[in-house]
């Protein structure tokens, strides 16, 4: 293969890394510039893609980016912003902080359980910013709060923001979302339990496991098993949400039973009605998504009939599902919850409008990166890279598959963007070396979760939430070793289990 051609195929990815990490350019600027570069290479480079075809590929990518990806991001952040406006988030925070004073248990409840819940319903930095600020307010050292929340916000991101990373991966690769969802959850199951122990060790050292071994184990198992079951039988939208809720409840119950002596002194009790109203929007989100999942095919299929199907690129139809999509369901649930909480329709709409405006640059980033991924895939640039990687690594590629996913998240700050960047490549290489494509694609999605803790964008969120702006380098130095071990273990696991995939098949 022509070395210059390979470099040209890699250049959009290399430029993203250089411009984000070294030049520290804003993501929306560099991603849009990279899209232009990708179009130029595809049209005028070795791949000779017709300009009209390239523009159609860009348009299809933009459509996928806006619906369902951006609508979910807007909806999730909208729900969180309304919770702040109504004061519900303050009530939720107070409820969590009154359970125990044991820092090990607080980390499992707030950083792991509640952080996982926020990742499941919102993502987009909320799962780091909110728990980190809560822990700092509880007396944790700000540096520790930032690091512990970054490490906790790894495994949950695979199914974050109502499953959008996995849903996007399925859209990019064309593989069944149910299969990718199940395989990703399966590969991460061990890590869910390992991460809970790591969080306790980071909090109090290896000796800190004493006294909370049961709570640590139950916190991991209560997350892993429900997530795996949900991923296999219900799709990608709810695994993180259900897993985090089960983990949080199990840890709280365990703390109430076996660690009652660590509870904080009673303060003014919060009325049950106030607690219910505070959680109501998230309860409605949970309920609506379950009702529209594969568990209730009649409802799902009925709502799915409200759709628009168009042909953008080639002969493949592109469908906009207007109601049977998580973004629409979240917005509807938030409106209903907000009205019950006493907010006017106009006030809620104002929060939605302000949220949308603030996410404009994010929309540019997401549209650009999804569009460039489509252009790279349709032009053959991804295939060029895949051939080179497959020829170099051959049957050992599964060992580095998670590393590519982590690299994508490190660069973009997003599991979704990483899946878009490397999903097609992973599938192409898997095909060339005759390994189950869904298994390798899932490995990339699983590996992407590791890159979250070292992503400059995630670290920036953590430092902003804890008042440590300027300390990003110190935090990255602490999380880098954890990330390296994470990717190494995951790659080994993915490679070693290949002969047994047939036993895991959906």
Image (cartoon, grey):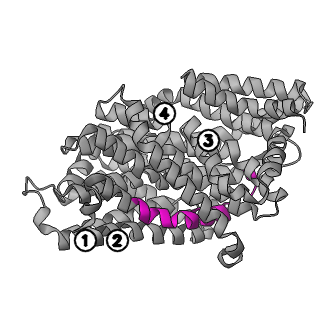
* Label located before the other in sequence (4 or 1): 1
Q: Residue at x 36, y 43 (%)?
A: 147
Q: Would you say residue 187 sits in the magenta stretch?
A: yes
Residue, disc 4: 456
Q: Which residue sits at x=73%, y=38%?
A: 373
* Residue 471 location (% of width, % of height): 36, 29
Q: Which callout, 1 or 3, points to the residue nearer the camera?
A: 3
**Marking on residue 408:** 3
Q: Is residue 496 visible?
A: yes
**Residue hosting label 1:** 254
Q: Position of residue 17 (x, y in %)?
A: 62, 31
Viewed as shown, does residue 421 lie left or right of 352? right
User: In the rendered view, does 43 fall on the left or right side of 34?
Assistant: right
Q: Earlier in the sequence, mark 4 or mark 3?
A: 3
Look at mark 2 in the image and give the residue it sits on: 218
- In this picture, is 80 found above or below 250? above
Left or right placement of residue 357 versus residue 213 in this view: right
How many other residues sit within 10 Å of disc 1, few (<14), some (14-19) or many (≥20)?
A: some
2 or 1: tag closer to the N-terminus: 2
Secondary structure at badge 3 equals: helix
Q: Are marks 4 and 3 in contact (CB under 8 Å)?
A: no
């Amino acid at each position: 293969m022509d070395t210059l051609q390979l470099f040209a195929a890699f250049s959009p990815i290399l430029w993203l890394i250089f411009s984000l990490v070294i030049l520290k350019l804003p993501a929306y600027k560099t991603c849009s510039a990279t899209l232009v570069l990708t179009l130029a290479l595809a049209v005028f480079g070795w791949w000779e893609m017709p300009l009209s075809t390239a523009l159609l590929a860009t348009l299809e990518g933009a459509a996928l980016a806006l619906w369902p990806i951006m609508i979910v991001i807007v909806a999730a952040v909208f729900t969180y912003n309304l919770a702040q406006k109504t004061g519900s988030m303050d009530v939720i925070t107070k409820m969590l902080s009154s359970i125990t004073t044991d820092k090990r248990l607080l980390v499992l409840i707030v950083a792991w359980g509640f952080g996982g819940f926020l990742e499941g319903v919102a993502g987009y930095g909320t799962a780091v910013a909110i728990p980190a600020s809560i822990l700092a307010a509880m007396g944790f050292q700000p540096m520790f709060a930032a690091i512990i929340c970054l490490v906790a916000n790894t495994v949950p991101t695979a199914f974050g923001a109502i499953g959008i990373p996995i849903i996007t991966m399925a859209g990019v690769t064309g593989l069944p979302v149910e299969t990718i969802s199940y395989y990703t959850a399966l590969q991460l199951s061990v890590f869910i339990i390992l991460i809970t122990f790591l969080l306790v060790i980071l909090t109090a050292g290896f000796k800190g496991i004493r006294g909370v071994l049961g709570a640590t184990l139950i916190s991991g198992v209560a997350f892993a098993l429900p997530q795996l079951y949900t991923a296999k039988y219900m799709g990608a939208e709810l695994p993180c949400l259900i897993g985090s809720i089960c983990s949080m409840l199990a840890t709280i119950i365990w703390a109430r039973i076996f660690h009652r002596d660590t509870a904080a002194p009673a303060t003014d009790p919060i009325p049950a009605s106030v607690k219910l109203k505070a959680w109501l929007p998230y309860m409605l989100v949970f309920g609506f998504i379950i009702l529209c999942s594969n568990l209730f095919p009649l409802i799902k299929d009925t709502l799915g009939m409200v759709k628009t199907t168009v042909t953008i690129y080639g002969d493949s139809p592109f469908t906009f599902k207007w109601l049977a999509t998580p973004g629409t369901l979240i917005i509807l649930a938030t409106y209903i919850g907000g009205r019950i909480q006493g907010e006017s329709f106009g006030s809620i709409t104002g929060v939605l409008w302000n949220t949308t405006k603030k996410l404009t640059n994010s929309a540019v980033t997401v549209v650009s990166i999804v569009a460039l991924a489509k252009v790279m895939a349709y032009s053959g640039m991804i295939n060029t890279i895949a051939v080179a990687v497959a020829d170099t690594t051959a049957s050992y590629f599964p060992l580095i598959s998670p590393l590519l996913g982590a690299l994508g998240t490190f660069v973009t700050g997003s599991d979704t963007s990483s899946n878009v960047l490397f999903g097609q490549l992973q599938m192409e290489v898997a095909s060339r070396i005759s390994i189950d494509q869904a298994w390798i694609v899932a490995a990339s999605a699983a590996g992407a979760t590791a890159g979250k803790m070292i992503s400059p964008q995630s670290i920036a969120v953590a430092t902003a939430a804890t008042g440590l702006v300027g300390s990003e380098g110190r935090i990255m130095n602490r999380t880098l070793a954890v990330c390296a071990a994470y990717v190494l273990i995951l790659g080994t696991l993915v490679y070693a289990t290949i002969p047994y995939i047939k036993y895991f098949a959906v």
